[in-house]
Image (cartoon, grey):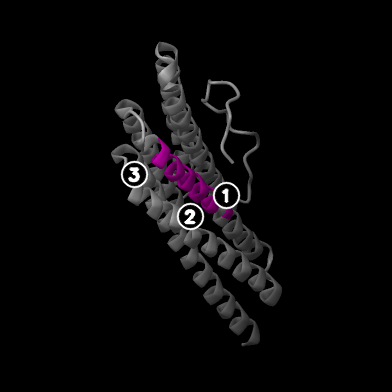
Amino acid sequence: MTAQHIASAFDRDLEAIQAQIMKMGGLVEAAIREAAKALETRDEELALTVRQGDKAIDGLEELINEEAARLIALRAPAASDLRLVLSVMKIAGNLERIGDYAKNMAKRTGVLAQGPNNREGTSALRRMAREVERMLKDALDSYIQRDVELARDVIERDRDVDQMYNALFRELLTHMMEDPRNISACMHLHFIAKNTERMGDHVTAIAEQVIYLVTGEKPEEDRKKADTTSTTPQEI
């Protein structure tokens, strides 16, 4: 009975942590969506809301890590359960980084809103962000459902995000070569595009964590990137 009670308590604690993960995931999905919308519509108020909302995302990551550490200390989970708890912490870390990139997108909206409107670039960025948001939703669904095939599908779709980034990079480069006055705005858009591409990488990391959680196997080698733009600056 004692062992059964301990197992039951562990399950309840773990369910509570996983509920926080899904709440955090929902906030991050909204941050991506709203940051991209703010950029395209030049809505500085919405961009500010995204920036302020990042505090809640950071707070959830801290809470999840604290609760996971407490769970390990108090319940001393077996190997498979320990893998689950550690996976939760890693997923929370990836979600926090995606939220940071969404916040960075929102930060640049105010600067871009003061200059000429590059409608093609901002529309392309919103499409790119929308795909990352859908990938994130599916990655989180794959986690809840322990669906390895869905997780693998998410990983494959990151190539589409890379290709979208490549196309936008070339488009922005063309604009800068055509008129030096476009350089400042295009550089801001490029930073946002690179940040969005990095969001896709973190979503991929979540999907890989799901596969590890279910199968106990890590990817044998680094995934080949479809980013063909060579080394480019990233915003940390």
- SS under mark 2: helix
Name the one closer to the observer, 47 or 156: 47
Label 2 to label 1: alpha-carbon separation: 9 Å
Pointer 3 or 1: first along the chain: 3
**Which of the marked residues, 3 or 2, is nearer the chain's N terminus?**
3
- Do callouts 2 and 1 mark residues in contact (Cβ within 8 Å)? yes
Amino acid identity at mark 1: Gln
Task: Identify the residue position indicated by label 2 in the image.
Answer: 143
In terms of secondary structure, where does tag 3 sit? helix
Q: Amino acid at mark 3?
A: Ala
Left or right: 230, with 137 as reference point: right
Residue under label 3: 38
- The earlier-in-sequence mark between 2 and 1 is 2
Q: Which region of the structure is painted magenta?
A: 93-111
Which residue is most to the bottom? Answer: 1
User: Does the magenta stretch mainly form a helix, a strand or a loop?
Assistant: helix
x, y (%) of residue 138? Answer: 41, 48
